[in-house]
Amino acid sequence: MPDRGTPKASFVRGIFAGVIHDALLFPYPPPLERRDPDEARVVRRLVREIRRLRGDLIDSARIDAEERIPEEVIEAFAEIGLLGISIPEEYGGLGLSSTGYAKVFAAVSSADPSCGVLIGVHCGLGSKAIVLYGNEAQKRRYLPLLARGETLAAYALTEPETGSDAQHIVTRATPAPNGDGWLLDGRKHWIGNGHRAGVITTFAQTQVTRRGETVQRPTAFIIRPDMPGFEVVGTVHKMGIRGSTQAELLYTDLRVPADHVLGEVGKGFEVAVNVLNAGRLSLASGCTAGAKQLVGQMAEYAEQRIQFGAPLASFEITQRKLAQLSADAYASDAMVGHLASIADRGEEHALEAACAKVFASELLWRAADEMVQVAGGRGYVQPWPYERLLRDVRINRIFEGANEVLRLFVGLNGLQGPAEQLKEVGAALRRPIENFNVVAGYATARVKAALGATDKVDAPLHDRLTKHKDYFEKHVAQLKEATQRAVLKYRKRIVERQLVVERLANMAVELYATGAAIARTQRLIDERGVERCEREIALCDLFCVEAGRRFRDARNALDASEEEVDDTRRAIAAAVRETAAYVADDSIMDEPGADEGADAEAPLPARGETAGARGVGGN
């Protein structure tokens, strides 16, 4: 067991305290081929097979139109071993690392987003939960058949009342009257694979004793559709990813045997959080791959499309789009590579996963939106694929935790500082915060001493990257200062000041992306030499400059003068909430009031008749 007095190292948590954990970022991890050649060969085979299926069985237009993934596609996935990529070899799977899984998932998502969702739910959520928390009997019973594709796995957490808030789900589990197992009652909705899965990881509140009191805590269970009390109520029609069916499930005294508890009773929150962390890595990888693919499609289309006597690609505005998306994709790819590596090493990565998911999903949305814009009318209609892609990618900002929630998760964790497990600091942050400037200085010193970190990038960098390093260090210090000011100013009310927390999180996201981009570029320079890395250096240069500008915008929004603007925002929102309507008058004509109902319902003048002659608006 680790020493609870020693803080866990996290790159993102560290920068909130002005601490840069070089060892977590430098040197940037080498390619998979060098780390594990055998696994790299398996990954290459799977990627090759997926691309073959894309030209053969996977027809995205058909999947979208029919709102289903054909059974022959799923059978082909099983045949090539795709359904077992997250399952260890001893249970019949391929046992890919986080890095290998991320690469394969990216290939599937690029082939078809609906297929990516099916694989993500089956491999990254449903099966993964059993891999991480199942006992030996559960693993031997269920993992082999999931690896072979005899049935699909699902992950049933989300509820109509509470969404994906695992801590506050309302589904209940009570001990069965005969003492053998549990009875579950509740509803789950938007459950991927839920209508066809044979093995489902689900969650329900159970009574447990904590500190002498009886309280409700979530517990994870393995359920099957053949258990009495299980019902698929129906499925939903969606804007995008239409082939990946989402179902509503109803549990009515659902009988679950005692040996189907997954993990420990009352410890389901831990199951949910750790499984979702893995899901955010795969989602970030898929979104990054999609963005890179869209950059290529945009360039190809813009070169072929002639406007005003020249290709669209020759215009600077189009070039700006291509350059900015490319630079952002470069940083996103760097985050994914780093995140997968620290996940494989067992390092703490919850905040890094959240940052990568937020950044990559918003990048993909921008890329799809810009692709539609570049394509013009063709971007809006079928049979061109661009409108479908725009619909498909919208869900990624909601999946695996809405981006707004993840920003709060990153920001609030950062506010606790990298020494969150130190009793002295933790107590101060759980109560109205007093003397935080003293505590923060003490915490930072403890972190540096314990982990050997500093407020500088100590790793050697090429001269071409020095200016970015200098700004990065400066911005880390500014994030620390902004964090301390926020805690001192708002004290326990900081949890309610979501705009402040969101801005701090945005600063952290930009810094993590910048650090990853610098580290990856340095790795490439070390391997190839600077002369053969000019394109990558240019991508890094552009990203660091633009990320620095976004960082400064977020920092400036924390100035005291912005408080008045936030007050105005709250006042306007209060007025809109009170009226449940837009609150200003129309600019063209007065809207009819309650006493003008007769005029509001008056028919239009007949042809040739003036409004004045009818007494409507005349003198």
Image: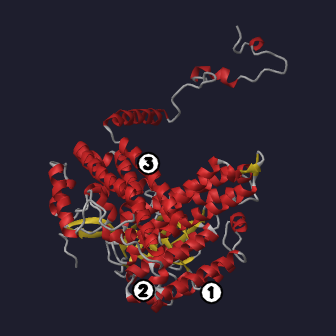
Q: CA distance from mark 3 to mark 1?
A: 46 Å
Q: Nearer the viewer, mark 3 or mark 1?
A: 3
Image height of 574 relative to 315, above or below: above
Q: What percent of the width, then of the height, locates residue 322?
A: 60, 55
Q: What percent of the width, then of the height, locates residue 574?
A: 42, 35
Instruction: Mark 3: give few (<14), some (14-19) or many (20+) Cα within 10 Å.
Output: some
Residue annotated with mark 1: 79
Number of marks in the image? Answer: 3
Q: Is residue 471 left or right of residue 196?
A: left
**Which comes sooner in the sequence, label 3 or label 2?**
2
Amino acid marked by disc 3: Arg
Residue depicted at x 68% and y 51%: 314
Amino acid marked by disc 2: Gln
Instruction: Mark 1: give few (<14), some (14-19) or many (20+) Cα within 10 Å.
Output: few
Image height of 371 relative to 562, above or below: below
Q: Nearer the viewer, mark 3 or mark 2?
A: 3
Q: Is residue 325 left or right of residue 516?
A: right
Q: CA distance from mark 3 to mark 2?
A: 48 Å
Amino acid marked by disc 1: Glu
Residue annotated with mark 2: 138
**Which comes sooner in the sequence, label 3 or label 1?**
1
